[in-house]
Amino acid sequence: MGGGGFSMEPDNPLLDIYFLQQTGKRTPKICFIPTASGDSENYIARFYSAFSKLNCVPSHLSLFKPPTADLESFILGHDAVYVGGGNTRSMLALWREWKLDLILRAALRAGCVLGGISAGAICWFEQGLTDSIPGKLTPLSCLGFLPGSCTPHYDGERERRPALHNLIAAGKMISGVAIDDGAAVHYINSELFKVISSRSKARAYQVRKSSSKIVEKALPVRHLSLNQVHVRPHQNQSGPR
């Protein structure tokens, strides 16, 4: 997700519901990883508040207060992993220290649905455009589960588009996808499957260099509505644990 979901659109759960549906489970187990926010307690509380209203079993993973020494078994016990936004550079450094990057790759191979917003979107690609360093937007090498680069908040932060174009033109960033707030890109087996959105004007774009020009191509998008997703409130999960 370039932006949106429970943290940016608390009254519009369409992207979050779509994400849960991709597990194929009636009551999926979903793990929220808020590392990029420094495990913000407010962020974690908002996750539980939002997902306790959906048909799922929510939990979260803190690397500052790990629930267990066996993080691999913990992650593999979930159907989906939802990564929150924040400082991508710091998040990836901590993940690598805990070998969570390797665990998440194992989860992907096991069929776990991986996703997230902002930092939780760009982390899966070869490269991401990040504001992790104050005052500027810079390329960042990420996990490489997906090919190319990823840029979130494409319409939500006016400096994103020119920064991406300039970096690709200068050869400092590889071609990739740019995602508006309220839009998401859905990949299956490293291939772009579809673009979906929770806002009528939200889109995603393929951005690449062709000769000396930057080419930006709007991708076909499916706009979600409540009659396309199904909310089945689950009352047994009421807060963090």
Image (cartoon, helix red, strand yellow):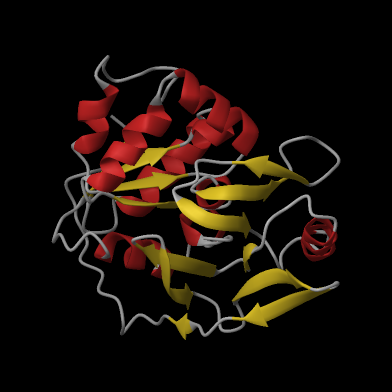
Q: Position of residue 43 (x, y in %)?
A: 50, 39
Residue for point 39% across, 17% down:
65
Q: Could one spot residue 87 in this view of the protein? A: no
The answer to whether any part of residue 187 appears in the image is: yes
The quadrant where residue 62 appears = top left
Residue at x-position 22% and y-position 53%: 56
Q: Is residue 118 above or below residue 197?
A: above
Q: Position of residue 85 (x, y in %)?
A: 56, 44
What's the residue at 26%, 49% (across, down)? 112
Between 111 and 80, which is closer to the camera in this rendering?
Answer: 111
User: Who's the residue at 71% across and 77% down the image?
Assistant: 216
The foreground one among 161 and 105 is: 105
Q: Residue furthest front?
A: 211
Q: Residue furthest top?
A: 69
Q: In the image, is 82 to the left or to the right of 34?
A: left
Across the whole image, how many numbered discs are drawn on residues?
A: 0
Q: Is residue 106 above or below residue 62?
A: below
Q: What percent of the width, then of the height, locates residue 103?
A: 32, 32
Left or right: where 230 falls relative to 136: left
Q: Quadrant of residue 107?
A: top left
- Looking at the image, residue 47 sits to the left or right of residue 59; the answer is right
- Quarter of image, res 32: top left
- Spot occupied by residue 193 in the image (x, y as percentages of width and height): 39, 73
159 versus 104 height, above or below: below
- The quarter in which the C terminus is drawn is top left
Single out the residue that lies furthest toward the left. Answer: 26
